[in-house]
Image (spheres, helix red, strand yellow):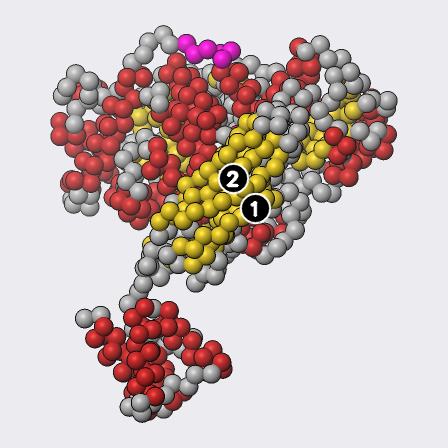
């Protein structure tokens, strides 16, 4: 053993190895005292540190934790489209872990927001895997740059809370590869998270914790994951099966390490597999050792609050701004309505619940800035019916104001880990109050606080301005003041479509499943991939967000750089007199394809800050994955030859320009057989040669002639050649035998 490392697995007894594969308690690894291996703490995550303050360290007490900076949860941060900012949040979280001697922070969670009703949408990133992966990678890289580990979760397909511990998510290989895996895959390849947390649910009938295909074949062998896999809390139901599948660590412990010992003795676990799993745990402890040895470290509370503030500023999405009602003029008479302005809803409920170091509400921020505004709470933050006294008071307060800032949203009890929501609608009492206020004063701006999408259309007519502020963390108040009063222009973009109605969502008929399973019947057509492909109206599209500035995207140019790669560039100009940031988005739209593909998919984005009148060129390298789909036929990624439009715009529905590239494709082909149809023979380079020769032989009178008119072509195109005799009797048999023989000759 060198001075800087703990022993290797070869120095441990069987019992000691087994002990490393479960926790010491709910929030600690199990150390091996005799060999000097410490049992470091690991705890939540994901938008700040939630370290239990309980006297007994094993206790799960979600609301009693040491103060830590509460950054905006992913619902907000994902709207920033700013990976550098997200990296800074990660660095700050790591510093808090070092102070609190936490070796691994449990996050980020990159499951796909398959349906906006999902209870944990507030802590997941997007309906789009490219965006989720390219944003959340900042948390992983940022935290780990300081020597603290992350736990990328929940691998995989934990997109709902209903029956989450038992349900089988039944998903096609293609949808897994294109939608539910890529965020994990990108982060593994780009940033090597030190740990991954497996999901509770089953995938196609096998619990994630026991799924060897998932945890070993895909994660380690295909993607090259080097870290350890831990179970979600209570997701390990069979120690032996899980360890064999590739699960290093059971959390929290079920005190069954003896099962591992017996199984290793009787051969149900191979020694090499136990060694691999236990060595992974030692490697993890080694990686975190330096950071965990730092003594008396104190993070800078103010500096971290400032990071939270900046993150909150970039998390808001301006949805509507009629008559340029925002920003509010400095001398305007302002009335603030809504309890959320005084008691902010700034994070979600469940395992991620943080005790913030500071809390500045919007009202506090106004006081700090010396802004004199009337305030009326208007409603209570519970699920109780409306209070007429509060309502009357609010309507009174709105009278005569130049602008009414109305803080509406979902109360804490409406969304949390542990259950899915039942409606996208806002609480009825808040909608009724908005209507009453708008009848009195037309200059209403609604500021929304919610972790996942709410319907906006039913009440939007009563608001000239709508600012979706999601959940903004502890510094949301000052950030809102900055944006509403125009110190900073809003720059957030939707990471999730806002539909008109939940029944428009493509997963609706398979949500949330029944009798222990949920069929992901919409396949790859999740979110905008469905809405845009099938031309369905949406209220606000994916990628959308207004600014106080205006921008123009022009000069879109694309160049092919290889058989399956291209580069695209464009110019973005701030055409206003306001300094602000715009996010340029790149979508790839395949031409004719062998499989049903979404109309277009996000494959690049860049947030660019531009001073008034300034412009900049942006460019993007698109690799082969930007053009590929997962082919179940090849069991691999496949880029077809043909035309691809590369679109550049500012939302999935605001495409400023596009350019077409013609790609050669990857040339993958499957050998032709008697079961291949005529179309497949025609498209195949060798198959088409065989058909040419067959035609020539027919014209020379040495072979029967294959009928070739529009009707027969249609018929034959979908017919395996071994069925030719149905159409042509004995001649058909002769033809198909000839084709196979010729093909065999060519492929010799
Ligand atoms: C959650 C995880 C969390 C863990 C520990 C589980 O219920 O699903 O996200 O990290 O608890 O609190």
Q: Position of residue 179 (x, y in %)?
A: 45, 47
Task: Say which element carries label 1.
Answer: strand
The N terminus sits in image quarter: top left
Q: Quadrant of residue 743?
A: bottom left
Q: Position of residue 441 (x, y in %)?
A: 84, 29
Residue 679 vs 553, above or below: the answer is below
**Segment colored magenta:** 298-303
Is residue 300 magenta-colored? yes
Asked if residue 614 lies left or right of residue 164, the reply is: right
Q: Earlier in the sequence, mark 2 or mark 1?
A: 2
Asked if residue 613 lies left or right of residue 698, the reply is: right
Could you classify mark 1 by the number of other residues whose Cα lies within 10 Å: few (under 14), some (14-19), or many (20 or more)? some
Residue 522 vs 92, above or below: the answer is below
Is residue 294 magenta-colored? no
Label 2–label 1 contact, CB within 8 A: yes
Q: Position of residue 354 (x, y in %)?
A: 51, 22
Can the viewer see residue 673?
yes
Residue at 42 percent across and 79 percent down: it is 716
Residue at 78 percent across and 18 percent down: it is 332
Residue at 39 percent across and 29 percent down: it is 140
Q: Quadrant of residue 349?
A: top right
Residue 352 vs 274, above or below: the answer is above
The residue labelled by disc 2 is: 570
Q: Which of 515 and 545 lies nearest the eye of the viewer?
A: 545
Q: Position of residue 706 (x, y in %)?
A: 38, 85
The residue labelled by disc 1 is: 657
Q: Which of 729 and 58 lies nearest the eye of the viewer?
A: 729
Residue 336 vs 22, above or below: the answer is above
Can the viewer see residue 31?
no
């Amino acid at each position: 053993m060198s001075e800087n490392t703990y022993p290797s697995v070869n120095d441990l007894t069987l019992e000691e190895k087994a002990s490393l594969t479960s926790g010491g308690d709910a929030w600690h690894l199990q150390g091996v005292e005799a060999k000097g291996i410490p049992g470091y703490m690991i705890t939540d995550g994901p938008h700040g540190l939630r370290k239990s303050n309980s006297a007994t360290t094993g206790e799960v007490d979600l609301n009693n934790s040491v103060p830590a900076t509460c950054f905006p949860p992913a619902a907000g941060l994902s709207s920033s489209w700013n990976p550098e900012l997200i990296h800074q949040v990660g660095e700050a979280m790591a510093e808090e872990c070092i102070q609190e001697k936490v070796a691994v922070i449990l996050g980020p969670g990159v499951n796909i927001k398959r349906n906006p009703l999902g209870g944990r949408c507030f802590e997941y990133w997007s309906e789009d895997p490219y965006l989720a992966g390219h944003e959340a990678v900042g948390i992983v890289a940022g935290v780990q740059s300081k020597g603290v580990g992350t736990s990328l979760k929940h691998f995989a397909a934990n997109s709902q809370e209903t029956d989450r511990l038992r349900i089988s998510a039944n998903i096609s290989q293609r949808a897994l590869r294109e939608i539910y895996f890529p965020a994990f895959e990108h982060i593994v390849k780009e940033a090597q998270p030190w740990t991954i947390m497996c999901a509770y649910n089953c995938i196609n009938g096998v619990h994630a914790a026991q799924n060897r295909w998932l945890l070993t074949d895909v994660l380690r062998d295909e993607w090259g994951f080097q870290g350890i896999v831990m179970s979600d809390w209570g997701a390990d139901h069979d120690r032996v099966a899980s360890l064999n599948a590739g699960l290093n660590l059971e959390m929290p412990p079920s005190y069954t390490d003896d099962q591992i010992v017996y199984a290793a003795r009787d051969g149900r676990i191979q020694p090499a597999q136990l060694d691999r799993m236990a060595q992974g745990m030692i490697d993890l402890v080694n990686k975190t050792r330096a950071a965990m040895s730092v003594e008396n470290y104190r993070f800078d509370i103010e500096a971290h609050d400032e990071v939270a503030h900046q993150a909150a500023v970039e998390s808001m999405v301006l949805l509507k701004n009629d008559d340029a009602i925002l920003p509010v003029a400095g001398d305007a008479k302002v009335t603030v309505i809504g309890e959320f302005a005084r008691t902010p809803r700034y994070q979600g409920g469940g395992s991620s619940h943080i005790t913030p170091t500071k809390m500045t509400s919007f009202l506090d921020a106004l006081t700090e800035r010396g802004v004199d505004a009337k305030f009326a709470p208007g409603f209570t933050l519970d699920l109780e019916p409306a209070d007429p006294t509060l309502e009357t008071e609010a309507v009174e307060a709105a009278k005569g104001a130049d602008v009414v800032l109305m803080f509406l949203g979902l109360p804490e009890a409406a969304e949390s880990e542990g259950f899915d929501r039942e409606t996208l609608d806002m609480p009825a009492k808040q909608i009724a109050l908005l209507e009453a206020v708008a009848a009195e004063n037309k200059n209403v701006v609604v500021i929304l606080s919610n972790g996942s999408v709410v319907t906006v259309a039913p009440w939007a007519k009563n608001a000239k301005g709508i600012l979706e502020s999601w959940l903004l963390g502890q510094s949301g108040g000052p950030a809102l003041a900055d944006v509403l009063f125009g110190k900073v222009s809003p720059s957030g973009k939707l990471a999730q479509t806002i539909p008109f109605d939940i029944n428009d969502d493509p997963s609706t008929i398979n949500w949330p499943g029944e009798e222990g399973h949920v069929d992901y019947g919409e396949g790859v057509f999740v979110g905008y991939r469905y809405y845009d492909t099938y031309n369905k109206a949406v209220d606000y599209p994916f990628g959308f967000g207004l600014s106080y500035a205006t921008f123009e995207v022009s000069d879109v140019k694309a160049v092919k750089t290889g058989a399956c790669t291209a580069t695209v560039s464009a110019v973005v100009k701030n055409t206003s007199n306001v300094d602000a940031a715009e996010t340029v988005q790149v979508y790839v739209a395949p031409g004719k394809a062998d499989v049903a593909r979404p109309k277009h998919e996000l494959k690049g984005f860049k947030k660019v800050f531009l001073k008034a009148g300034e412009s900049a060129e942006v460019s993007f390298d698109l690799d082969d994955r930007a053009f590929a789909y997962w082919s179940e036929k090849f069991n691999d990624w496949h880029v077809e030859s043909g035309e691809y439009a590369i679109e550049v715009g500012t939302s999935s529905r605001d495409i400023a320009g596009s350019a077409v590239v013609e790609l050669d494709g990857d040339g993958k082909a499957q050998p032709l057989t008697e079961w291949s149809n005529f179309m497949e023979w025609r498209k195949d380079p060798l198959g088409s040669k065989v058909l040419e020769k067959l035609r020539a032989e027919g014209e020379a009178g040495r072979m029967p002639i294959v009928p070739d008119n529009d009707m027969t072509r249609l018929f034959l195109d979908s017919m395996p050649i071994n069925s030719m005799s149905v159409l042509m009797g004995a001649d058909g048999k002769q033809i198909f035998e000839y084709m196979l023989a010729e093909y065999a000759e060519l492929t010799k």
